[in-house]
Amino acid sequence: MTVYPKDSSAEAVVLADYGESTIAYQQNQGFKLTFERLRRIKILTKDGLKWGDFSIPLYHDSNQEEKVSSLKVVTYNLENGKIIETKAKSDSYMKEKYDANFNITKVTWPNVKAGSILEISYKVTSDFLFNFQDWEFQTTIPTRWSEYRARIPEYYNYEKYMQGYVVLSVNENDRQPNSITVTYTQRSGGTGFTPVSSSMNNENISFQENRFRWAAGDVPAFKKEPFITTPKDYISKISFELSYTNFSHEFSNPGIKQYMGSWEDINKAYWESVGEEITGNNSLKNQVEAIVAGLTTPDQKVSAIFNYVRQNVLWDGYYRRYPEDSPKKTLEAKKGNSAEINFLLMSLLEKADFSVNPVLLSTRDHGFVRETTPISSQFNNVVCLVRLGDKSVLLDATDKFLPIGMISEECLNGQGFVVSKEGFKWISLQPATRTKTIFSTDLTLAESGELKGSLKIDKTGYNSVEARKSYLTKGEKDYVSTLSEGRSWTLSKSEFQNAKEIQQPFKEVHEVVISEHITEAGNTIYLSPFILAKLEDNPFKQEKRNYPVDFGHPFDQMYLAKITIPDGYIVDELPKMKVIGLPENAAKYSYNVAQTGNTLSITSSLNINRSLFSQVEYPNLREFYNVMVAKQAEQIVLKKK
């Protein structure tokens, strides 16, 4: 097979993926969790060679760690009519630290090429029964068969969450009797002249075992479309969370023990774990006094402390919800993960007598948070909330270009979980400053067919952050070069405002000569009025979408152009005015071209007023963009008198 019949674009296909998780009793060790897997993938094209890399996550805590065994990695190739088997050598397996609680074992198949079949099988043994293996029935390539089984004694109760849009071929569960034999030592005697004696006894304990089988066949590849958080929020999978255990009297720890808890429990545990990092570290007080010396208003002091942290401590690129080093050590190292940097910020603000709280959140790549399911592992990052007068302001010091009141775009994912000694609350993560770009042009159409004049661009919100980051990272010369790259433009002069003032809009003005957007045919000129900001294609290609559109935040884009046409020409045709909108003012687009003498005024305004659109709203949103693309493609027609 060189092409998968049900998806000719597939670079590879999962032929079979089998997994089974079992909780079983082991003498002198108690219950253990084992996970076994067998997977086969067919590589169809060169683009599919990347499937020759695989990672096995292994949870660890303190000195305990999950263990992988029976690892077998084999490549099968058909050469000269014979099946050639190539096994990976054990010394090719690599173990790497992933984060504070996970290591990964990385494997690479040998001799992989188009046409190869890759097989892997392994077993993971775990003492961490709360870390029950989730299972994904779907991935970014087609899957012919995916099957997962679980055998769980009645003592363990897991909440199970099924997500996605793939209909299971098999969904079975039943209860079967099972038993374990517990061996224990019984001692007797030892009183008076009776010698101590011991005997080995066996006790048989019967219980009910819950057995599950889930399977899906001919699963289509998950096709990633624009404006989603992460595919793992929407691919078809089943997840498990240990809710509680309930052991019978035969065991040493009988009764019910809750594991899932509540948001109140999570708030309390987190504050007890990290609260001292904020209120302690009193050696930093002298540092704070030096930072705010001479400043009088709360806004000035917060700004000074925020700027001090973001300018002096480098983010290492890792999102974490717990700091590994203290604020003092982080400041000395001048580098840290997101938790370490933002806890340093909170500690410094607290020393300046500001009320601060950690805000736990999940980045977009980590996935959405189910507020109905109180599980702390849903979070992977923390930012700062500071009280300023009668308002609370979010701060994130990991990005040197983020202003006060804005957190990274990657963090705009649902709501934030505010932790405090008094109790938790949920808050919006959306910034007060709206993201907006205004393009303004004042151009003259010369007899030569060139457009000459000025181009002005004003950016606020996240557009300002990205532009400023690009400008200060690349330098002015490269920034200007990028603007004109791929265009027939000549920029003779460029000016920039607020390049380093991160709280202000980023502004740029360019003197430009444009040798495009004009097509001449005899006595007729066709003018494409969008110098910038033109939407060439609809980003929403699919007619149907099974998951929401998530822009991250609302935004505006406005294009204002003034074009003076030369004497001797008249306007033969102008695009007609258009105003379209979505229900409840979720989005609006307006377009108009007006003529006053020899001057044409073009106004195009796009407003996306919500960050999230459901799959039910998708057809209307897609058509909204279709109309906008078509409208912006219309040309202005000029003719010689």
Image (cartoon, rainbow, N blue to C red):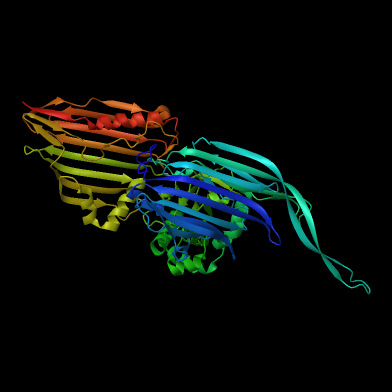
Q: In this view, does 23 lie to the left or right of 512?
A: right
The residue that appears at 17% across and 31% down in the rendered structure is: 600
- Tell me where residue 242 appears, x and y as whole percent: 63, 49
State the image quarter where residue 128 is shown: bottom right
Q: In this view, does 249 lie to the left or right of 345?
A: right
- Tell me where residue 319 appears, x and y as whole percent: 46, 56
The residue that appears at 59% across and 45% down in the rendered structure is: 149
As drawn, which residue projects farthest toward the front? 81
Question: In the depicted view, which residue is nearer to us: 290 or 85?
Answer: 85
Q: Is residue 63 left or right of residue 506?
A: right
Q: How many marks?
A: 0
In this rendering, does residue 383 appear at all? no
- Tell me where residue 445 appears, x and y as whole percent: 11, 37
In this rendering, is residue 102 above or below 81?
below
The residue that appears at 28% across and 41% down in the rendered structure is: 438
Q: Quadrant of the C terminus?
A: top left
As drawn, which residue projects farthest toward the bottom? 193
Question: In the depicted view, which residue is nearer to us: 238 or 82?
Answer: 82
- Tell me where residue 613 appears, x and y as whole percent: 43, 34
Question: In the depicted view, which residue is nearer to us: 558 or 120?
Answer: 120
Question: In the depicted view, which residue is nearer to us: 556 or 71?
Answer: 71
Q: Quadrant of the N terminus?
A: top left
In this rendering, does residue 471 appear at all? yes
State the image quarter where residue 517 is shown: top left
